[in-house]
Amino acid sequence: MIPLTHILILSALLFSIGVLGVMLRRNVIVIFMSIELMLNAVNLSFIGFARSLDSMTGVVFIFFIIVVAAAEAVVGLSIILAIYRTRKSLNIDDFNLLRW
Amino acid sequence: MSQIWLIPAFPLLGFLLNGFLGKIFGTRFVSFVGPMSVGLAFLQSLVLFFEMLRTEGHRIIENLYTWMAAGSFQVNISFQVDELSGLYLLIITGVGFLIHVYSIGYMNGEKGYYRYFAYLNLFVFFMLLLVLGDSFLLMFVGWEGVGLCSYLLIGYYFEKHSAAEACKKAFLFNRVGDFGVLSAVLLIFLSIGSLEFNTVNAEAASRLEYGGTLVTVITLLLFLGATGKSAQIPLYVWLPDAMEGPTPVSALIHAATMVTAGLYMVARLSHLFILAPLTMNVIAVIGTVTALLAATIALTQTDIKRVLAYSTVSQLGYMFLAMGVGAFTAGIFHVMTHAFFKALLFLGSGSVIYAMHHEQDMMKMGALRKKLPVTYLTMMAGTLAITGIPLFSGFFSKDEILWKAFSSPLGSGLFWTLGFLTAGMTSFYMFRMMFLTFHGNSRVDSHLQSHLHESPLSMTGPLVILAVLSIFGGFFGVPHVLHFLPNGMELYFHDFFAKAPGDAHGSMNTEILLMVLSVMLALFGWFWARKMYSGSLDAARRMSRSWSTLYDLSLNKWYVDEIYQALIIAPGRLLSTHLLWQAFDKNVIDRSVNGSGVLARGAGGLIRGLQDGVMQTYALIFAIGTLTVIWYIF
Amino acid sequence: MLILFYLFATISVICALGVLFMKNPFHCALMLVGTFFCLGGIYVMLNAEFVAVIQVLVYAGAIMVLFLFVLMLLSTNEPSQVAVKWDVGKMLAVVVTLGIFTQVASVFSDGSMMLGEKGAYPLEKIEEIGSITLIGQLLFTEYVLPFEIISILLLVAVIGAVVIAKRRFN
């Protein structure tokens, strides 16, 4: 039996790495990938809790999270495509038209 | 009971009509409305005067409405007619009416005719407000108002640079006095708690200690205001310059009414002033010195109006001397007689100026008495009155003052001596003026000679009436020693004014002796003036050369204006330019205002940096927020 | 058992760090796939086989393929010089993230963490019914509303993606 705290700490670690990826990387698509990483970390903690609490709610929830992540990735990538057409760059520093 | 408010209402109506409709309806309308409004005010004043005499306690108070009420402090607009204000009412409206009629002739053809009468009516309105008000605040409204109208009327010929300077000077010196009055009002309110005259007079003795600092400060501040309005040292310098205005203005404002406002205030608050013997002393001293100083200056002036202006300052000094020794009745008596003969003298000089086509230099006049007989005779009456020739009005009032200066508990022989000398000088310069203008050889310019003629009836009529008053007006106040008539003034004002503490000194014999002495000096002044000025002027010229230093000092008004300029005005200007403007206003105030703008912009710029459009900044802010929340919860 | 967990955990962390630090975005994508596989392994160890399969199929199989497609479509000519351009903001980001991690980790490793009440499906019951059956049952009875909603969500996402990414011919 895997102790809950280990799973949770792993989940927290992966989540932090995802947050770092969002804040540090310059390529937009890699940022997206970091977001997916964050979602996965959360999935892991859900499973951990589901197991230790003998509940199926966590599992079903993961199902939904995966679906939502898929939808979000689709829409996000299409937006990036649309932006790429005008900006001709994938560097997030170039997407700064909404500044003061 | 008759309406007091009608008295000031008539001139106010006159001002409104003349001011707004005068230009439309023209000269005849203005000539009718202007004098008529003051005439109606005079009639109403007569009615109220007699009603006041019939009333118990000789006082009528009419409350119009509550001006302000805040807590326990309440001020009403209410008018009061008692002995003092009743007399003033008659003087103001009576003499004012005569001057308005005179103005119809004098100001004929001037541009801005309607403006003149509008301002003159407004002046009468404010002066009436001043004397009718039963509290300091209402009096102060009138006080400021007459200052304003004086400014407007002195600057009547505003296109002339000297006139513009003069009216500004008048207003500014008045303002210094007003500061004194306001400070005093504040202190009175703090110590006595009310601003009504009757309350202040009644409570003054109980609330303020005799001779104490507070009452001395209050009365000194009030006197400062009086020096501003009534042209005493140190604030008298505006009055000679005020002669830039039209002559009837000089007659009304600067002889008969506005300059007596300061005296009115001191007389009104006699019960307050009597509590401060130091102030009384100061008043008497300043009055005497002013009288003396102005008389010395009048000795050498060549402009006919300047002589009369300095004469006014000198006579006002006499009145303040009277107030200062506690002879309030005598002072007010002299106010009345002075109003008659000084207005007469000014109007007469105006008649001369009118005939001379606005030439005012006496050196260019001479031998006018054949051409302007009525003017000559009436002016002679006025001169006899002012110099104190017996049985004329000025004799009784001036002598009363000199006697009281000697005999009152607050008076002394020194006051009498200086007043005596001043009277001698008065006689000399007044007769000098008469001889230079009307006697001797004609020094008139040749092209004016043929145009010299007597003034129209609108001008000579008031002259005659004022002459009659100057001759017979003194019989109201015959002193007791001369037994032939009761002293009307004393009877009229009995117990109205406060009495100076202490005993009077001097016997009846002394009084008669002093009277004889002053008459003799007056006659000597006439004699000497005649010797110097009624023939050729060589003797006068020789004397001016041999006494040249004194002559220069006198001619240049003792350089007082220049001293003020150097000591007060120039440093003040330097201070405001370099310190207040450059150092403070520009650097501190402008910088801080601009600085707040710069600060706002800077702060905005800093905060604006957060919105840089780069998503990762926003993500960072999210993360910081998340950290904070987690920290707080756990 | 535990050793296996530690192995998978380590590999997943290394792959995640690879996502973070690799210069080439393609490499990052492949690293992410590696992370997904390891996580799948961990799910299996936690008796959530169905979730593990779904994870590999959908996440690693579909979503990451999509990512790779887009990457290939949009691959720029210039190779990205640096993965991260360090400045003050980015340093602050590291600090903040470290802070978040320490906070969360300290909470989780507390030991005295209060857990809620136990659910209704202990391990024996799951093995009895079968985990997929159980998930199916739950999806169509208790959680049918969210199930329907996410299907609509998927539809909307598809339509939205087509519309946004369509080339406009003006």
Image (tube, coloured by chain):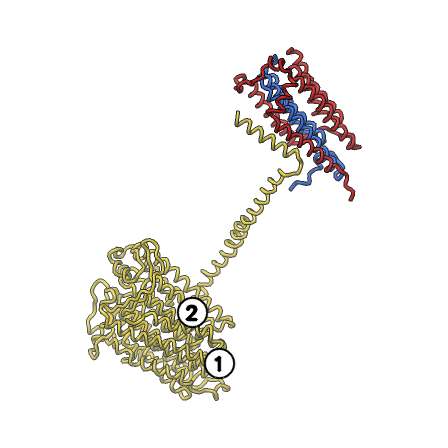
| x and y, in percent, of residue A80 in the image | 72, 35
Q: Which residue is mark 1?
A: B109
Secondary structure, mark 1, is loop
Q: Which of C45 and B208 lies nearest the eye of the viewer?
A: C45
| x and y, in percent, of residue C161 in the image | 72, 35
> Could you tell me which chain the residue with mark 2 belongs to?
B
Lower position in the chain sequence, tag 2 or tag 1 = 1
| x and y, in percent, of residue B347 in the image | 39, 79
> Could you tell me which chain the residue with mark 1 belongs to?
B
- Residues indicated by labels 2 and 1 sit on the same polypeptide chain: yes
CA separation, marks 2 and 1? 22 Å
Q: Colour of chain B?
A: yellow
Secondary structure, mark 2, is helix
Q: Colour of chain C?
A: red
| x and y, in percent, of residue B391 in the image | 27, 80
Q: Amino acid at mark 1?
A: Gly
Q: Is residue B452 left or right of residue B591?
A: left
Q: In this picture, is A99 found above or below B218?
A: above
Which quarter of the rendering shows the N terminus of chain A? top right
Around disc 2, counting alpha carbons within 10 Å, would you say few (fewer than 14), some (14 to 19), or many (20 or more)? many
Q: Colour of chain A?
A: blue
Q: Which residue is mark 2?
A: B149
Q: Amino acid at mark 2?
A: Cys
Q: Which of B302 and B62 lies nearest the eye of the viewer?
A: B62
Visible in this render: residue B310? no
Around disc 1, counting alpha carbons within 10 Å, would you say few (fewer than 14), some (14 to 19), or many (20 or more)? few
